[in-house]
Amino acid sequence: MEYCKLQIGCMIIVLYVACIYIREKQIYQMKRKNVLFEIILAAGIVGIFFDGATAYTVNHLAEIPASVNTFLHLCFLSFLDIFVFLMFLYMYDITRGLPQKRGERIGLFLPLLINIVVVIVFMPQLEYRKGTFTNYSMGMSAYTCFAMVALYVLAASGIFLHSWKNLERHKQIAISTYLLVTIGVTAYQMFFPEALLSSLVPAVVIVGIYLNQETPLYAKLQKNNEEMVMGFATLVENRDDNTGGHIRRTTAYVKLLAEELRSRGFYKEQLTNDYVANLVMAAPMHDVGKIAIPDAILQKPGKLTDEEFEIMKTHAQKGGKIIRETFGHLGNDAYEEMAYEVAAHHHEKWNGRGYPDGLKETEIPLCARIMAVADVFDAVSAKRCYRDAMPLDQCFHIIEEGRGRDYDPVLVDVFIEIEDKIRKVYEESKAE
């Protein structure tokens, strides 16, 4: 046991995390949140087991049959590669989303498959060397394994740095920590193979992902925040008798459009999982500034006068101010900033003739550009006290007419192409 104390300690930590994770899912009645994390958890447990087993067998070569030792090393090297690959895949998923095209997916998996084949082919040539404190294994299989680990760690680091600005603060800290640990352990193990520190990688990565991204408690708190935001937005909406269901429909349109943009590779650097999640939670707050608009104007049954319209237009700027003063306590700076941008800038136009700041083209935050399309579409497709709802064909035509004038051309093109999905949301809303 003296040769695998580190592996035993890491195994206890990871098993503890697994037990807490399963227990919290039951307590908070959370559905499966991220299958990839659960696969990482399982792969980490198996990998640490084989790491500990090989640490023992390599120091008891006379007692352990050679075939058993070779098999255990094959499993250890394979699962080490698989674990680091899964870490890379998880990083890819939370930043860009997993690729939808078959060719791109094959490109992600191909280096791993090639490496495992090389490890298997060269396993009979694996050497067992005697060190100062412990024996260790070396050979082409081990070199290939650590080269592949280095490749995927560098790739994960590149993706992380590229997506740095669009990740929440606590995720930046957590991911930085476990990437640095992985790089440090890998480098040390390559130069000092006798160290046998590789079990630290799955332990640190799993603890980091769990505490900062996948804990059911955090998901529950996030859900409570979402319900609070939706409740506040509904309270504001209820002041305007003409816009019932507006926030639910616009939020659905925003989610559809953002996810479709990401799946097609548009704005992929910005449309991370965090960005889309924050956008969906920020969308209900786009008209929060209307709480500061007098009822006489907000509920007026006819057309507003020029003076009244100028007052109505202030709801965007006031909405941004309310967000700044009210939602800073949520502890999510990225969400607060996005909610501000959505509320303050969803009436800006692509040609710069919108309000309140006259921003144009990409000066307008992407989240506000997405919100603008969803907001106008729902406004013209919903019934108001001073007019009936317009036919959906006409509503889509209005959006298409605004391409390159009022709205981002890319957003309009994608919105029109997902017409069937938009119609489905609209029909479901009518049926409620």
Image: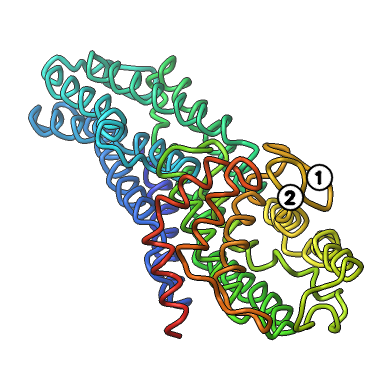
**Residue 156 visible in the snapshot:** yes
**Disc 2 secondary structure class:** loop
Q: Which residue is mark 1?
A: 358
**Disc 1 secondary structure class:** loop
Decide: is 150 above or below 81.
above
Q: Position of residue 326 (x, y in %)?
A: 82, 67
Instruction: Answer whether labels 1 and 2 touch (C-beta < 8 Å).
Output: yes
Quarter of the image for the N terminus: give it: top left
Which amino acid is tagged 1?
Answer: Gly
Left or right of 49? Residue 368 is right
Q: Residue at x 24, y 27 (%)?
A: 110
Q: Nearer the viewer, residue 139 or 110?
A: 110
Labels 1 and 2: the sequence-earlier one: 2
**Residue 77 visible in the snapshot:** no
Quadrant of res 150: top left
Q: Residue at x 49, y 66 (%)?
A: 216
Q: Which residue is mark 2?
A: 348
Q: Nearer the viewer, residue 283 or 28?
A: 283
Quarter of the image for the C terminus: give it: bottom left
Left or right of 316? Residue 263 is left
In whole angstroms, how far apart are the C-alphas of marks 1 and 2? 6 Å
Q: Residue at x 41, y 66 (%)?
A: 423
Q: Position of residue 135 (x, y in %)?
A: 30, 22
Q: Nearer the viewer, residue 39 or 196?
A: 39
Labels in figure, total: 2
Which amino acid is tagged 2?
Answer: Glu
